[in-house]
Amino acid sequence: MSETAPASRAILAPLLIGLVGGSVLVSLGLWQVQRLTWKEGLIAGIEARIHDAPIPLPDAPTQERDQYLPVIVEGAGGSEELRILVSRRDTGPGYRIVTTFETGGGRVILLDRGFVPDRARNAPRTPAEGRIVGNLLWPNEVDGAFTPAPDIEANVWFARDLPAMAARLGTEPLLVVQREGGAGGPGAPRPWPVDTAHIPNDHLEYAGTWFSLALFWFGMTGYWLWRIRRRRT
């Protein structure tokens, strides 16, 4: 038997481990690149829909068909409001203001009027009225037991819980997030329109992590093989 045969057998297992493990890590990185392309396309489609020409409020909208649909509603809002605790990067803590809105056709829905800073939460506000342009939204903000129940007495909510808000204010479980229109004046909420900022897109970072691990894996495999060769010589 040649002297090279034992040496070949000694490096076979490390070589296979290195190639298989590294290939798996590279595959995961490539999969994340594919996911990145898919997610960017999804976000672009949502952005396009958000800014489509608005249409009158459909009779029976559904989440599956009408999420983000731009709509026009005309009517008047109520004075009772729900305050959802949030924070804006440019302003700090504050509240989303959600009220009732009765359309000219007699439907009563929920209207997300926008944001007020914490110092203005108790300020008097003129109810919304007239023509409002916004987007239908079924928020996905309630995270089971991790989302605290609303403090009804203090009127502080921790998520836009659509069924609970509708039950509280006696409306359809339908939310329009205001983009423009409504009453202005002192104390009026600043519209916080629907956008895609809430949609996570970390696939590029994930891909970089997997590719970095693959590079490290191949490097350690090379070092392992070098150590085996050095011991044998």
Image (cartoon, grey):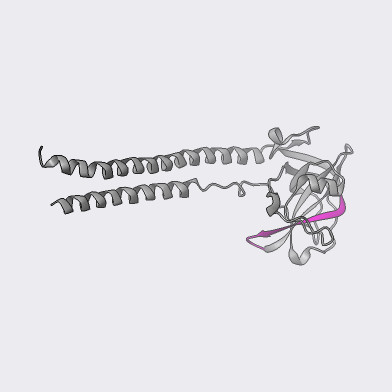
Q: Quadrant of residue 91?
A: bottom right
> Is 85 within the magenta?
yes
Q: Is residue 140 above or below residue 155?
A: above
Horizontal side of residue 10 vs 202, given as left or right: left
Residue at the image point whose x is 81% and y is 54% from the top: 82
User: Magenta stretch?
Assistant: 77-91
Horizontal relation, residue 35 to residue 197: left or right: left
As drawn, 56 above or below 199 = above
Please identify the quadrant where the N terminus is shown. Answer: top left
Q: Is residue 34 left or right of residue 188?
A: left
Front-lying residue, 209 or 188: 209
Question: What is the residue that sits farthest to the left in this orientation?
Answer: 2
Residue 145 appears anywhere in the view = yes
How many marks overall?
A: 0
Q: Which residue is rendered at x = 86% and y = 49% of the image?
A: 169
Q: Position of residue 7 (x, y in %)?
A: 17, 44
- The answer to whether residue 51 shows anywhere in this view is no
Q: Position of residue 109 (x, y in %)?
A: 83, 43
Along the line of sight, the residue nearer the viewer: 183 or 25: 25
Residue 84 is one of the magenta-drawn residues: yes
Main SS, magenta region, reads strand
Residue lying at the far bottom of the rendered structure = 119
- Most distant residue in the front direction: 1
Q: Position of residue 31 (x, y in %)?
A: 45, 39
Name the quadrant containing residue 58: top right
